[in-house]
Image (spheres, rainbow, N blue to C red):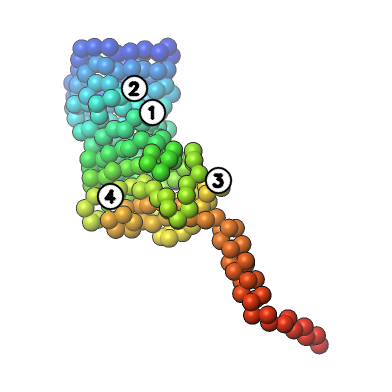
């Protein structure tokens, strides 16, 4: 186990060989890892601090984030890793798009407005939460999955809206799922599980969700008018029609 303590630290070069033992790296504060880690037992990130991995992860046995944050640095260091995000940990893209070999998640993933490409399966479980920013109609957090997508126990979707989308025009492909396999499971917002075609509200914006959007197996959000706007529109149309028909209102006493 490597434990630099509570000060910011760096593993700045060479190779650290854990042999067949799991490499546990405790980050009490910010920890930059430029050293190559070698093990066949996998690597586990613990401690409340943020570990930025800059060296390519060439070990076997997988990677898990048990506590604190794991940030993949530039150059797709986790491109061949299956990353397990445990409930106490966070996988944080920190503003950078990257490729990861696979994700099995029961903790939060901070996508921000970046793209996370998965060269394998995306499997999210109870406790998983996707934090996604919509900066514009072109820049928003999303997954490109070259594998299967499973959202078990209804994964929490937390959107942060940074602009005002155009109703009926703007759409956001949050999960671009390759091939023809359909997505298993559903998103939820708070306690509301989002069914196919359901409209939900984020701030002042309403979205309709589809799990069969794009090429037929992608999760797409469509900007739509708010429920209030829709009912006002319906009421206005009704009143106009009533006015045009000039139907006299008949009052009838009861009893
Ligand atoms: Ca697709
Ligand atoms: Ca697929």
Question: Decide: marks 1, 2 in contact (CB < 8 A)?
Answer: yes
The residue depicted at 49 percent of the width and 40 percent of the height is: 163
Q: Judge whether residue 106 can be spotted in this image.
A: no
The residue beneath circle 3 is 203
Q: Residues within 10 Å of mark 2 (few under 14, many from 20)?
A: many
Q: Nearer the viewer, mark 2 or mark 4?
A: 4
Give 156 or 84, whichever is nearer the viewer: 156
Q: Residue 194 occupies which quadrant of the picture? A: bottom left
For marks 1 and 3, the one nearer the N-term is 1
Whole-angstrom CA distance, mark 4 to mark 3, is 27 Å
For marks 2 and 4, the one nearer the N-term is 2
Give 63 or 8, whichever is nearer the viewer: 8
Where does residue 17 sit, x and y in percent of width and height?
20, 17
Which quarter of the image is occupied by the C terminus? bottom right
200 relative to 20, above or below: below
**Local secondary structure at mark 1:** loop
Q: Residues within 10 Å of mark 1 (few under 14, many from 20)?
A: some
Whole-angstrom CA distance, mark 2 to mark 4, is 28 Å
Residue 177 is marked as 4
In the displayed structure, does residue 68 sit left or right of residue 121? right
Q: Residue 78 occupies which quadrant of the picture? A: top left
Residue 94 is marked as 1
Residue 52 is marked as 2
Question: Decide: marks 4, 3 in contact (CB < 8 A)?
Answer: no
Q: Residues within 10 Å of mark 4 (few under 14, many from 20)?
A: many
**Local secondary structure at mark 2:** strand
Q: Residue 242 occupies which quadrant of the picture? A: bottom right
**Local secondary structure at mark 3:** loop
152 relative to 240, above or below: above
Where does residue 90 sit, x and y in percent of width and height?
40, 32
The residue depicted at 58 percent of the width and 63 percent of the height is: 233
In the displayed structure, does residue 63 sit left or right of residue 92? left
């Amino acid at each position: 186990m490597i434990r630099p303590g509570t000060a910011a630290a760096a593993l700045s070069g060479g190779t650290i060989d854990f042999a067949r033992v799991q490499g546990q790296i405790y980050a009490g504060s910010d920890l930059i890892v430029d050293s190559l880690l070698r093990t066949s037992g996998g690597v586990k990130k613990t401690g409340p601090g943020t570990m930025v991995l800059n060296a390519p992860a060439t070990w076997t046995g997988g990677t898990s984030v048990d506590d604190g944050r794991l940030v993949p640095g530039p150059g797709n260091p986790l491109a061949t890793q299956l990353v397990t995000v445990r409930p106490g940990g966070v996988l944080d893209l920190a503003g950078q798009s990257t490729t990861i070999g696979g994700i099995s998640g029961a903790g939060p993933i901070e996508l921000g407005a970046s793209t996370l490409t998965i060269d394998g399966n995306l499997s999210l479980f109870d406790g998983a939460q996707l934090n996604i920013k919509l900066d514009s109609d072109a820049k928003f957090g999303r997954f490109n999955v070259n594998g299967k997508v499973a959202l078990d126990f209804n994964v929490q979707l937390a959107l942060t809206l940074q602009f005002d989308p155009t109703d009926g025009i703007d759409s956001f492909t949050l999960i671009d799922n390759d091939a023809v396999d359909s997505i298993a499971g559903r998103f939820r917002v708070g306690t509301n599980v989002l069914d196919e075609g359901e409209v939900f509200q984020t701030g002042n914006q309403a979205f309709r969700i589809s799990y069969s959007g794009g090429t037929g197996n992608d999760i797409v959000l469509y900007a739509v008018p708010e429920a209030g706007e829709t009912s006002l529109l319906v009421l206005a149309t009704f009143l106009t029609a009533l006015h045009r028909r000039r139907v006299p209102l008949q009052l009838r006493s009861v009893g």
